[in-house]
Amino acid sequence: SQKIEQNSEALNIQEGKTATLTCNYTNYSPAYLQWYRQDPGRGPVFLLLIRENEKEKRKERLKVTFDTTLKQSLFHITASQPADSATYLCAQTGEAGTALIFGKGTTLSVSS
Amino acid sequence: EPEVTQTPSHQVTQMGQEVILRCVPISNHLYFYWYRQILGQKVEFLVSFYNNEISEKSEIFDDQFSVERPDGSNFTLKIRSTKLEDSAMYFCASSERWGGSTEAFFGQGTRLTVV
């Protein structure tokens, strides 16, 4: 079955730096890949969606890349701020294609 | 901004009891989902629902669980004979289209505590 791996459980960076989070997947390549933000005790909140024929997608300080050869997506937050501290989840559809399956997430801490 | 609403926010139940978790998806969405998150663990898919039937379910979603859309607005998750290990945050979500092609909107969750 498909596996989604977010290699780093935690990432600590200083304010103003760029945070880069990694999502790897096995087996089949999904048509879409999504990134969500989750704050403690809250539901995931959608950030970005990238399609398999897109190399890169941007939204304000966020950037996502999708490399179907490497089976990897990178999520970047530029000029990071303490308010960016949260858990970031990578998600794609499972084999049946009807629902999102999530990685374990990477918890980002931005210190001032 | 439209949002997914879940009630109650916190439910405490005795082991062996039945609980019903309620969700009101976004009104023009047709696809509905339940997820759970045990404390400190990942968000796990339970079930997807469309056109009044289950489209996909995970291994977690066994005979203990059922879902229903009893009217035009509510979407419920029933857990029978609750066990201690059912204690988790349960999230409802909805989307305009299937799976990964569009964003999913999540509710704030129901924290279920089985004692």
Image: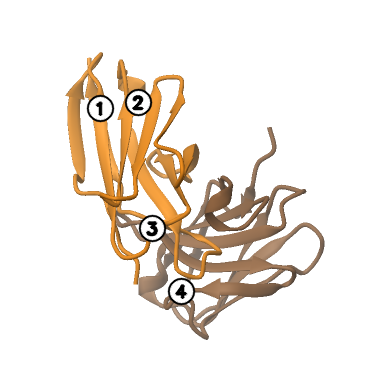
Q: Amino acid at mark 3?
A: Ser
C-alpha separation, residue under disc 3 versus residue under disc 1: 25 Å
- Residue at x-position 33% and y-position 40%: A87
Instruction: Give coordinates of residue A98: x percent, y percent.
Output: 56, 64
Q: Is residue A68 above or below residue B36?
A: above
Looking at the image, do the residues carrying marks 4 and 2 touch, with CB atoms under 8 Å apart? no
- Residue at x-position 51% and y-position 82%: B64
Q: Amino acid at mark 1?
A: Ala
C-alpha separation, residue under disc 3 versus residue under disc 2: 29 Å
Task: Indicate the secondary structure of the residue bearing disc 1.
Answer: strand
Residue tagged 2: A84
C-alpha separation, residue under disc 4 versus residue under disc 3: 20 Å
Residue tagged 3: A29
Instruction: Give coordinates of residue B83: x percent, y percent.
Output: 41, 78
Marked residue chain, label 3: A
Q: Amino acid at mark 4?
A: Ser
Callouts 4 and 1 in the same chain: no
Chain B as rendered: colour: brown
- Residue at x-position 64% and y-position 47%: B4
Residue tagged 1: A19
Question: Is A109 left or right of A90, judged from the image as shown?
Answer: left
Identify the disc placed on residue B58: 4
C-alpha separation, residue under disc 2 versus residue under disc 1: 10 Å
